């Protein structure tokens, strides 16, 4: 997740959508006051190499807590200050940034065809080795907590200004360049996080009819708002 005061945007990081590569690209245009959440050691090294910057300013200042929230956290013995974290959702971000920032900054995220996303997840989590087939992987909870919709929505409603498609990241780079009025075109790094696990590229070669129906149910909201098809 990135909150850029320099360019007045909030990047909401979703799962299995090239979001780490996007995050690294955006880090390159960030300033010293911007908020960037930590990524794993290997990805952080790639960010440092590509953007010459690392995670920063991700602890939430105590002056951003309401009295009610602060008392609630103290009563639960939560360690303070809290931190912004990579896949933090809109609801939490909104709680911990000034209203002016939330209302005025350009908020955006990346979404991906769920049929393709789940096949990517299946191999990334070694579902082929653990379950033998993708239907068993899904049926036995392999997708638990993996809906990106809950990250970029609040109370069931989309809370970002723009959802870009994973399938068209070139447009994403062009559009962000124009919106933020960047001097140089935004470019994704050659480094691709988590890209070496997938064994089969075409998702239709992996999914069976039962798996397709489960994905349609679990990701009905994403399919509807993005007009995704199998």
Image: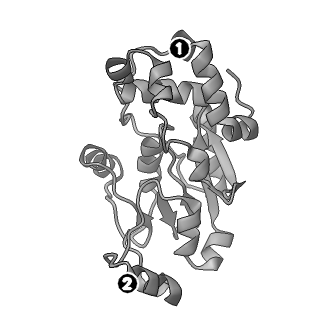
Of 83 and 170, the residue lying toward us: 83
Q: Name the residue beneath numbered marker 2.
A: 74
> CA–CA distance between discs 1 and 2?
50 Å
- The residue positioned farthest toward the top in the image shown: 205
The residue lying at 51 percent from left, 28 percent from top is 118
- Could you say which quadrant of the image residue 148 lies in? top right
Left or right, 219 with respect to 120, comes to right
> In the picture shown, does residue 211 fall above or below 178?
above
Q: Regarding mark 2 in the picture, which secondary structure is present there?
A: helix
Left or right, 225 with respect to 116, comes to right
Q: Nearer the viewer, mark 1 or mark 2?
A: 2
- The residue positioned farthest toward the front in the image shown: 140
Percent of width and height locating residue 75:
39, 83
Mark 2 is surrounded, within 10 Å at the Cα level, by few (under 14), some (14 to 19) or many (20 or more) other residues, namely few
> In the picture shown, does residue 98 fall above or below 17?
below
Percent of width and height locating residue 90:
58, 61
- Could you say which quadrant of the image residue 192 lies in? top left
> In the picture shown, does residue 117 fall above or below 132?
below
Does residue 29 appear in the picture of this structure?
yes
Q: Regarding mark 1 in the picture, which secondary structure is present there?
A: loop
The residue lying at 66 percent from left, 57 percent from top is 160
Q: Name the residue beneath numbered marker 1.
A: 202
Of 230 and 101, the residue lying toward us: 230
Left or right, 146 with respect to 150, comes to left
Indicate how the structure is coloured in the image: one colour
Of 101 and 53, the residue lying toward us: 101
> In the picture shown, does residue 57 fall above or below 149?
below
């Amino acid at each position: 997740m990135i909150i850029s005061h320099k360019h007045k945007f909030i990047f909401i990081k979703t799962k299995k959508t090239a979001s780490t590569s996007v995050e690294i690209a955006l880090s390159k245009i960030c300033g010293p006051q911007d908020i960037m959440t930590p990524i794993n050691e290997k990805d952080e090294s790639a960010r440092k190499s590509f953007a010459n910057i690392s995670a920063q300013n991700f602890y939430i200042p105590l002056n951003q807590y309401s009295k009610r929230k602060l008392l609630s956290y103290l009563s639960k013995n939560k360690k303070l200050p809290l931190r912004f974290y990579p896949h933090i959702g809109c609801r939490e971000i909104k709680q911990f940034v000034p209203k002016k920032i939330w209302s005025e900054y350009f908020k955006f995220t990346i979404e991906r065809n769920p049929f393709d996303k789940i096949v990517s997840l299946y191999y990334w989590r070694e579902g082929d080795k653990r379950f033998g087939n993708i239907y068993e992987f899904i049926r036995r909870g392999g997708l638990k907590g993996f809906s990106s919709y809950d990250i970029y929505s609040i109370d069931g409603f989309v809370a970002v200004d723009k959802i870009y498609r994973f399938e068209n990241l070139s447009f994403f780079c062009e559009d962000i360049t124009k919106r933020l009025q960047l001097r140089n075109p935004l470019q994704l790094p050659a480094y691709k996080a988590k890209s070496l696990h997938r064994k089969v590229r075409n998702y239709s070669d992996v999914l069976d009819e039962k798996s397709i129906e489960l994905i349609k149910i679990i990701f009905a909201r994403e399919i509807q708002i993005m007009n995704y098809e199998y």
